[in-house]
Image: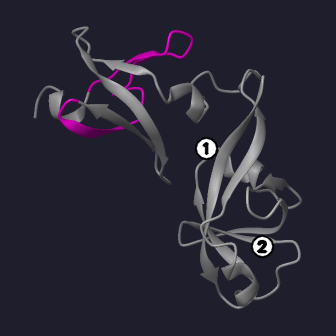
């Protein structure tokens, strides 16, 4: 099933050549923002990526038809989407699409309900699950040690929040 997934947000202009910083919202930025890739936006139609480079851990993209700082400024805060087949077999069994995780109910190992996944935050080192709990938002690194079980079909997962882990 193909779904339109949020893959990034255009940030501020970088340099004078019309590059923009990108707030990455995908775990496959090399594919989604490859040179020649087409991304969809709500405000500016489809955009074609003309350059892709990392600078101090920040993704910088060039966009077809944009050649200077003033031209890229009008794209600031534009959300970028890609059509993604979320049923396609992933190379990695631990690879999940953000939309498959949002809305999952997180349970503690004891079986007690912990909260609902409201967002997945992509950071360079790892993704964080944002879980709404009765005590507010809890951020849990999305790593096997802290999220040992993910069942996207039944929208359930088991989490071990860092503050509950033994030996601290």
Query: What secondary structure is marked by label 1?
Result: loop
Count of picture labels: 2
The stretch drawn in magenta includes residue 155:
yes
Residue visible at 72% across and 52% down in the picture: 30
CA neighbours of label 1 inside 10 A, class few (<14), some (14 to 19), many (20+): some
Quarter placement of the C terminus: top left
User: x and y percent of residue 32 in the render?
Assistant: 75, 49
Extreme-front residue of the structure: 43
Residue drawn 66% across the image and 49% down it: 7
State which quadrant residue 90 falls in. Answer: top right
Spot occupied by residue 8 in the image (x, y as percentages of width and height):
63, 55
**Residue drawn at 58 percent across, 31 percent down:** 99
Q: Which image quarter: residue 157? A: top left
Q: Which residues are magenta?
A: 134-160
Q: Nearer the viewer, residue 156 or 29?
A: 156
Q: Label 1 belongs to which residue?
A: 27
**Eyeballing the image, is 103 above or below 141?**
above
Q: Label 2: few (<14), some or many (≥20) within 10 Å?
A: many
Q: Is residue 168 magenta?
A: no
Quadrant for the N terminus, please: top right
Front residue of 74 and 89? 74
Residue at figure coordinates x 88%, y 77% from the top left: 65
Instruction: Please state if 62 lies on the left or on the right of 158 as rendered.
Output: right
Residue ID for mark 2: 62
Q: Is residue 54 above or below residue 40?
A: below
Residue 50 against residue 15 in the figure, above or below:
above
Q: Is residue 26 left or right of residue 35?
A: left
Numbered disc 2: secondary structure:
strand
Question: Residue 24, position in %: x, y?
Answer: 59, 55
Type of colouring = one colour
Kindly report the distance in space between the C-alpha atoms of the residues bearing marks 2 and 1.
20 Å
Above or below, 100 relative to 153: below
């Amino acid at each position: 099933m193909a779904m339109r997934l949020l893959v990034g947000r255009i940030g501020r202009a970088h340099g004078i050549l019309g590059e923009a910083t990108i707030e990455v919202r995908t775990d496959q930025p090399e594919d989604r923002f490859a040179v020649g890739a087409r991304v969809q936006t709500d405000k500016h139609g489809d955009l074609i990526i003309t350059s892709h480079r990392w600078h101090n851990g920040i993704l910088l993209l060039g966009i077809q038809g944009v050649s200077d700082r003033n031209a890229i400024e009008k794209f600031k805060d534009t959300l970028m989407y890609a059509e993604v087949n979320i049923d396609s077999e992933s190379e990695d069994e631990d690879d999940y699409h953000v939309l498959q995780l949002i809305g999952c109910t997180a349970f503690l190992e004891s079986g007690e309900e912990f909260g609902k996944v409201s967002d997945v935050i992509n950071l360079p080192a790892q993704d964080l699950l944002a879980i709404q709990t009765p005590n507010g938002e809890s951020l849990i690194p999305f790593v096997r040690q802290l999220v040992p079980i993910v069942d996207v079909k039944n929208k359930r997962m088991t989490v071990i929040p860092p503050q509950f882990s033994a030996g601290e």
